[in-house]
Amino acid sequence: MSIVVTMKEDALVQFKLMLPASLKRALEERAHTNRRALSQEMVAILEQSLPAARDRLRKTHALADLAALAEEFEGEEGDLVRRLVLRKMDQEISEIEKLRSTLETLQLEALRGEKSKDS
């Protein structure tokens, strides 16, 4: 017999988290700047990034499915559908590149913070 425990979506859950010291310092600085507790800052960052990433992934998969479907259209209608799908895919790729750039910037800031504290 197994017991399954389900939590409410908004229930607070405490757990142990291990992360690089430099990242913790960067998060602490950001929390201080935003006048929040460290855990509140981490929750805010995760809430901002996770739904967006999940939604973007779903949209990207849907566009890929639509592109495959567009191949079945012929003539001018097919060309129009393919152009629209390609334009939307280009927009999505641009958004993904922006997200990647933001992530790289945050990683560099964390590394710089680590180096400046070591000096």
Image: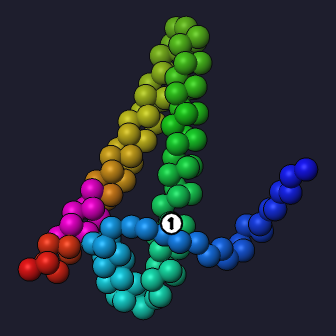
- Which residue is most to the right? 1
> How far across and how far down the image is residue 18, in percent?
43, 68
User: In screen coordinates, is 5 left or right of 100?
Assistant: right
Q: Which residues are magenta?
A: 104-112
Instruction: Say which residue appears at 50% left-offset and 52% top-offset.
Output: 53
Single out the residue that lies furthest toward the top: 74
Disc 1 residue type (three-letter): Leu
Up the image or down, 4 lies above or below 28; here it is above
Write the residue at 67% across / 77% down: 12
The residue sitting at 49% across, 29% down in the picture is: 85
Q: Position of residue 99 (x, y in %)?
A: 37, 53
Label the magenta part by its dominant secondary structure.
helix
**Farthest residue toward the left?**
119
Give above or below for 48 relative to 40.
Answer: above
Q: Is residue 22 on the magenta stretch?
A: no
Residue 41, percent from left and from top:
46, 79
Q: Which residue is mark 1?
A: 46
Instruction: Confirm whether residue 98 shows in the render.
Output: no
Total of numbered circles in the picture?
Answer: 1
Q: Residue at x 36, y 89 (%)?
A: 32
Give 9 or 13, whichever is nearer the viewer: 13
